[in-house]
Image (cartoon, grey):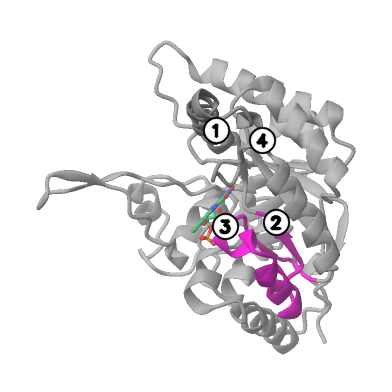
Amino acid sequence: MADLATTYLGLPLRNPLVIAASSVTARIENLELCDRFGAGAVVLRSLFEEQILADRSQLEEVLDTASGSHAEAQDYFPPVSHADATDYLRRIEESKKAVSIPIIASLNAVNNGSWTRYARQMVEAGADAIELNVYSVATDLNVSSQQIEEQLLELVEGVLSVASVPVSVKLSPYYTSLVNVVGQLDQRKVGGVVLFNRFLQPDIDPQSETLTNAMPLSSPNELRLPLRYVALLAGRVKCDLAISTGVHRGEDMVRAILAGATVTQIAASVIKNGIHHIATMLRDLEAWMDERGHHSVDDLRGRLSQQAVNDPFAFERAQYVNLLLSGGALSGPLNARVN
Ligand SMILES: Cc1cc2nc3c(=O)[nH]c(=O)nc-3n(C[C@H](O)[C@H](O)[C@H](O)COP(=O)(O)O)c2cc1C
C-alpha cells in the first residue's frame, strides 16, 4: 500500500491533504469530521483584524449609548461575537483538544503591530503553525509594487521574529514576478508558501443595475495556475509549497504532487461534496499510486516539476503561437512523463 505520510511546515502529516481556511474549518464539529475522514491537517478560518476593528467600533457605540442611561454601563455586554481575538484564541485551544491532527491558525491583520501581536497570541493558544493570509486589493495609485512587496517582507519578518512555530504565507497570484517574491520569502526562512488565495470578485447584475458579491466555488480547471508556479518553484526554494485552488479530486492531488507540491489544500470540494469526500480523495490517490507502483508521495513529489521534465520550457510558454510552433496539439500531451 502506498505511503501517503509526509512533512509540512516541519509537522509530520499522515497524508498531504490539508483542509483550507474556510467556513468548513470554522466549527469544531467539522474539524472532528475532517480528522475522522482522514485529513492530514486543518487550517482554521482566518482571524480577520478588520472584523475585530469593525466589531470594536460597534462595541464602543453600544457602550456610549448605554453609559448615558445606566451607571453599570461598563458591565454591559453587547451582542457582538468578535469584540477581540478571544473567541479565535479559544477556538484554537478547543480545536487542539478536539482533534489530534495539526492545527494551523490563519491570520489576516491590518496594522503592522497587530500581525505580530496576534501571531504571538496564536502560538500561546497552541497553534502548531501560522498561515499568514496577506492579501488586500492594492488601490492606491501612488503605491508601487515594490513598496507593496517591501511591506509584505517587513510584516513577515516581524511575525517570524516572534513566532516559535513554523509560518507559511498564503499569496495571491497578482505579483509581477511571483517567483521572485517566493524566493525573497524563502530567504527569510518562511516554512512554506500557499499558492493561491482566491478572492471575492464583485460582479454587476445588469438586470437590477446593482453590485453583487456572490462567490462561485472553484472548478478543477483553476488548478493550472498554481500547478504551473509550483512546478516552476519546486527544487529551487527550500520552503514547502502548498497548492490551494482547484484541487477537487484524488487525481488533482496527483497532479499537484507531481508538479512538486508538498501538500494540497481543499475548500470548495468539501463544501460541494461534504466532508466525507476527504476519504474518497485519499482512496483515489492511494489507488492511483498502487496501480502504478509508486510507493510514497515523497518519492513522487516533483517528478514533473520544471527541473525534472525533459521539456523545461513547457512551464514557460505563455502564448498559443509557441505551442503551435512546438508541434503540440492544443489539448495533446506535452513531451514529458513520469519515468
Ligand atoms: C466559504 C469560504 C471561506 C473562506 N475563508 C477563508 C479564510 O478565512 N481565510 C483564507 O485564507 N482563505 C479562505 N478561503 C479561501 C480558501 O482557503 C481557498 O484558498 C480557496 O477557496 C481556493 O481553494 P478551493 O479551490 O479548494 O476552494 C475561503 C474560501 C471559501 C470558499
On screen, residue 264 versus residue 245, left or right, reads right
Q: How far separated are the C-alphas under marks 1 and 3?
A: 26 Å
Residue that label 4 marks: 75
* Percent x, y of residue 227: 56, 56
Which image quadrant for residue 260?
bottom right
* Percent x, y of residue 290: 75, 87
Residue that label 2 marks: 308
Image: 97 above or below 233: below
Indicate the amino acid at tag 2: Ala
Q: Give the range drawn in magenta.
A: 15-44
Indicate the amino acid at tag 1: Leu
Which image quadrant for residue 133?
top right
On the question of residue 234 being in view, the answer is no
Please state which of the two labelled residues, at mark 4 or mark 2, is closer to the viewer. Answer: 4
Please state which of the two labelled residues, at mark 3 or mark 2, is closer to the viewer. Answer: 3
Q: Is mark 3 within 8 Å of ligand 1?
A: yes
On the question of residue 319 being in view, the answer is yes
* Percent x, y of residue 163: 85, 35
Residue that label 1 marks: 59
Q: How far separated are the C-alphas under marks 3 and 4?
A: 34 Å
Q: Is mark 3 on a helix, strand or loop?
A: loop
Marked residue nearer the N-terminal end (4 or 1): 1
Marked residue nearer the N-terminal end (3 or 4): 3
Q: Label 4: how many residues lie within 10 Å, few (<14), some (14-19) or many (20+)?
A: few
Marked residue nearer the N-terminal end (2 or 1): 1
Residue that label 3 marks: 22
Q: Label 3: how many residues lie within 10 Å, few (<14), some (14-19) or many (20+)?
A: some
